[in-house]
Image: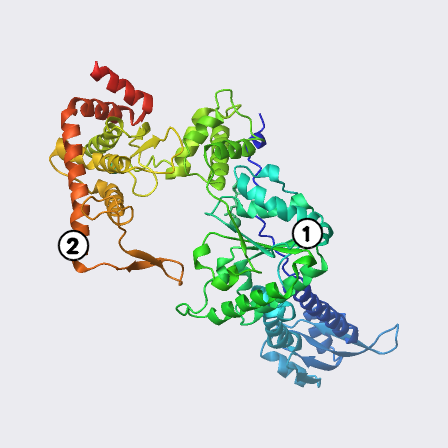
Amino acid sequence: MKRSNFQVNQKKPELELNKPPEKKMWQKQGPFSLWYFIVMLILLYFFQSAIQIKREEIPYSQFQHYLKMDQVSECIVGDKTIYGTLKLMDPKTGKPRRFITVPLYNSDLANALQKHGVKYRVAVESHFFRDLLFNWVLPFAFIFLLWGFLFRKMGTAGMNFLNIGKNKARIHAESLPRVTFDDVAGADEAKQELGEVIEFLRNPEHFQRLGGRMPKGVLLVGPPGTGKTLLARAVSGEAGVPFFNISGSDFIEMFVGVGAARVRDLFEQARTKAPCIIFIDELDAVGRQRGGPAVVGGHDEREQTLNQLLVEMDGFDSSSGVVVLSATNRPDVLDKALLRPGRFDRQIVVDKPDLKGRVEILKIHTRQLKLGSDVDLEVVARRTPGFVGAELANVANEAAILAARKNRDAITMADFEAAIDRVIAGPEKKSSILSPEEKHRVAYHESGHALVAELVPTGERVHKVSIIPRGIGALGYTLQVPEKEKFLATRNELLDQIAILLGGRVAEEIVFGDVSTGAQNDLERSSELARNMVCAYGMSEKLGALTFGKTSKSVFLGTEYGETKNYSEETAREIDAEVKAVVRDSYERVKKLLEDNRPLLDAIAARLEEKEVLSGEEVEAILKEYQK
Ligand code: ADP
Ligand code: MG
Ligand code: ZN
């Protein structure tokens, strides 16, 4: 079977921007100058030989013979040749014969010449051409080449000063494969809301007649990879209108004022092509709140660009048929002015897909793949909670690649399993082999997680336990699969989650009487959960249904830089005590649970150590065996 059947036809996000045609210095100027010099040299060579008087070449001995016979009338002695005229006449021209010979120098020559009364001189041989080459041609050629090379490197900045303000957006509608809503799955609400925009673009007059006002700007908000860019392209595809695609970061150039010029130009172009869509991807790159902590360089530039964007958005009438779409995954850092009515006043949330959505997305991305009969996309979707569209596309692609690598005729479920693992945790690290003692410990650690997950009342089913080291820092992992999508967590569920996280650590302690560094991530996550229970969810009995602390976001780089403390020192102490209590109680609980079920823990760990990977069914089989 052909390998190409396995290649996922992934549509690349459109980054292709209309760069002003690059002037290829090297191809235009470089060879031209070089040819010029070569031609010049050849011409000069012929020129020189043309002005040279025709002489007959004679052997040196002949020359000496003539010399002895007093037949040489005149000669010029160079360091490499001797030329001159003989007294003998050329029968054809009737003029004295001219000769050239290569001498064999000896000290007697001068004497002999003198003795025979020959008029002679020694010539300094001209190095004219050599000098020309080394002193003039080569240096200039070198400078020429260097110059061309540098300008080529500098590209837009060096050569295209004139084009600098032109926007890099380009009309995509004609040149790119049309994307429609059929290519986007699992974003039904977003599609529905965008439907209105499409209607408007298809038939702007109709809307105007009814006096309707379209929103000028629609902002797509959602985590990375959820298909925002794809949706925007689909809108243009559905409406069949031109699509100006530009990314926020394209506006930011090294020269102040360029971004603003680019914005102006973009809107100008769009107006001539209306109805059309301007799509500004990653709006947060240019639309960050103004007046934040100064970033070295480029800050003024960004503000100017943003201001220009605001001006342009105010400056056009929605009836002009231009709709500005935009996407961001950081709506919280956007400048408030951008979100005011008349600008991006409509926000559409594109969220991570749910189970049904994931199935649909997988269907889209396996359309061109050859799937084995055992592949159930529903199961794949069930095992990929929290995956976004881009990751699911990646899973399908990885599965295809793995199947191709194994020379299979069709992609099997096992390929999908392996692909999911790869996407979750990076490729298997076969090379980093654990020592037997480490493996023993990791087996118990993971078994601890798995057993606690099976034993606590709300624990989700264990799907897989593995002690194959993966990615960076993960020595093993226990994967649970929720039966159904969850949107809320109760207090008991959170406590069970903390228990599961602590399971690994406690198992190590019980079995080895000592703990290791392997539980760092577990502890971080369980502490955070406990703290959130107390501070954010108001789940502490002692402190009551209050929230404490407010996390503020930094404008600069959009990182969370700290908590605003809105409680007293005393409360802080209480919070700490409560968090500690939650963790301590959970720890005791897990310890008891595992001690009571020690034979089970041993059984699972032994099997895991032997097989390295256990499926949920295998774990359950062990449980059943012991519960009899
Ligand atoms: P975003 O712009 O939200 O970061 P993209 O639109 O760039 O995400 O999505 C990247 C790729 O992931 C898309 O080209 C597509 O192949 C895939 N993808 C993402 N979401 C979806 C979806 N809802 N349906 C189908 N494919 C999707
Ligand atoms: Mg995007
Ligand atoms: Zn762990």
Crowd around label 2: few <14 · some 14–19 · many ≥20 (10 Å): few
- In front: mark 2 or mark 1? 2
Amino acid at circle 2: Arg
Q: Position of residue 360 (x, y in %)?
A: 53, 32
Q: Quadrant of residue 259?
A: bottom right
Amino acid at circle 1: Pro
| Residue 101 in the image: above or below residue 547 | below
Q: CA distance from mark 2 to mark 1?
A: 60 Å
The residue drawn where x is 22% and y is 26% is 605
Crowd around label 1: few <14 · some 14–19 · many ≥20 (10 Å): many
| Residue 332 in the image: above or below residue 73 | above
| Residue 411 in the image: above or below residue 276 | above
The residue drawn where x is 72% and y is 60% is 272
Of 179 and 610, which appears nearest the observer? 179
Of 179 and 549, which appears nearest the observer? 549
Q: Position of residue 69 (x, y in %)?
A: 74, 77
The residue drawn where x is 59% and y is 72% is 143
From the viewer's perspective, is 366 left or right of 90?
Answer: left
2 or 1: tag closer to the N-terminus = 1
The residue drawn where x is 68% and y is 50% is 201
What label sits on residue 573 in the rendered view? 2
Q: Which residue is mark 1?
A: 242
Of 15 and 329, which appears nearest the observer? 329
The kind of secondary structure element at disc 2 is: helix
Quadrant holding the C terminus = top left
Q: Quadrant of residue 602?
A: top left
